Image (cartoon, rainbow, N blue to C red):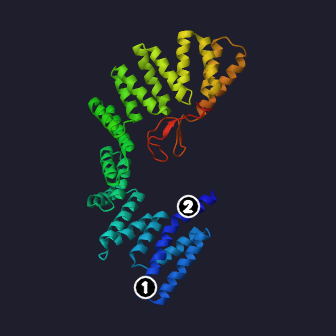
Amino acid sequence: MAFIEQWFWFVLLLPAAAVMGWVIGRRGGERHSDSQVSKLSTTYFRGLNYLLNEQPDKAIELFLHIAELDKETFETQLALGHLFRRRGEVDRAIRLHQALVERKDLSDAQRVQALLALGEDYMKSGLLDRAETVFVELAETGHRAPQALRHLIDIFQSERDWNRAIESAHRFEAATGEPMGKLIAMYECELAERHRTNGDVTATREAIARAYAADSNAVRAGMLEGRLEAAAGNDEAAIKALERAARHDADYLPDILPTLLQCYERTGDIPGARRFLAEMAEHYAGVAPVLALTHLVEREEGVQAARLYLTQQLKDRPSVRGEAALIDLALRDGADILGTLQALGRINDQLLVRNPSYRCNHCGFGARSHHWQCPSCRQWGVVKPLLNYALV
């Protein structure tokens, strides 16, 4: 952990040190006294030495001292503002960058840099309305448009202003060529959820259609469509949408199956359900389709057949939930050692209660309920039902 922290500070301060070193070197050719340049140079190399010797606090103080000695040079002051922000002194960073923006001797490019830094200060301090004003100005003028648009996307996402987030994402994609379809589809699904909550079915369908247009493999759009069709009594359309979603990303199968199996039940297509579950069991590492298929086998062929099927499956995919289901079948099938099985069942129940049901594939955040946006790292579409053999 200490090594990671030291490396973090090295990466963080090295760009600032490079800027200050460049400024000092440039000043050697300008009309300044040799003693002043020498003083700056000596301080710079002392700071660099602290940085290389993994003493970031001392390095920061010296680099701040360099910037205080050189108040006229734009690059030095910009670097000083970044250091203030990274140290958590956001108010000082805002005041410094505001002063830079107001200077009359800046070129257009320098003013844009100062505005961008000021907007980032506002974001850091939570002043999103002020940050939005700055970044909208930069995006409209075309200066630093991709960076400004990226910040606007983050701001609108925080404010849950999905329409403006979508617009900014489209503009960002046009400016950079970076595909934004998956993110746009998530935002459209947020709108669909909102419309569905408000009872506006037409607007919900339109948002789902736009989500598919942005990302044809959007699993969330398929799940929304399936649930919407199921609620409307269109079970065959729901089955089609939910099966497509599961095939696009089987990791979401545990969340898809309850509605899907209800639709199969209502249509009476149990053979179709068994075929789909058998297909998923071949491609999905978790036990969810096996347990669902076990239930269907029990209903059509009896408890003993279900127990034999599940026993065979658990040889290849051992699972707490699978073992709990097997214990239940064994008890109802009149198997021996009932006391032991009951004790094992209680232990398994405790394990299932203590463990999270979902895990973020990006940062590892664990949760008992599903979140489309991870509460920890704020990434989208990375929180999924657990696949670990020991937990599912």
Image coordinates of residue 224 in percent, x first then y, are 38, 31
Residue at image position (41%, 85%) is: 30
Judge the density around disc 2: few (<14), some (14-19), many (≥20) Cα neighbours within 10 Å: few
Q: Specify the quadrant that holds the C terminus.
A: top right
Kind of element beneath mark 2: helix
Image coordinates of residue 238 in percent, x first then y, are 37, 24
State whether residue 319 is above or below residue 77.
above
Image coordinates of residue 256 in percent, x first then y, are 45, 28
Q: Specify the quadrant that holds the N terminus.
A: bottom right
Kind of element beneath mark 1: loop
Q: What residue type is labelled 2?
A: Phe
Q: Are marks 1 and 2 in contact (CB under 8 Å)?
A: no
**Of residues 36 and 124, the one drawn nearer to the viewer in this rendering:** 36
Q: How many labels does the image show?
A: 2
Q: Mark 2 points at which residue?
A: 8
Image coordinates of residue 106 in percent, x first then y, are 32, 74
Residue 353 as seen in the image, left or right of residue 172: right
**Of residues 359 and 315, the one drawn nearer to the viewer in this rendering:** 315
Look at the image and tell me whether residue 48 can be seen.
yes
Q: Mark 1 points at which residue?
A: 29
State whether residue 99 is above or below residue 231.
below
Q: What residue type is labelled 1?
A: Gly
Which quadrant would residue 48 be assigned to in this image?
A: bottom right
Residue 296 as seen in the image, left or right of residue 315: left
Q: Which mark is residue 112?
A: none
Judge the density around disc 1: few (<14), some (14-19), many (≥20) Cα neighbours within 10 Å: few
Which badge, 1 or 2, is on the more N-terminal residue?
2
Residue at image position (31%, 34%) is: 209
Q: How far apart are marks 1 and 2 (CA)?
A: 34 Å
Which quadrant would residue 311 be assigned to in this image?
A: top right
Which of the two marks, 1 or 2, is nearer to us in this view? 1
State whether residue 313 is above or below residue 142.
above
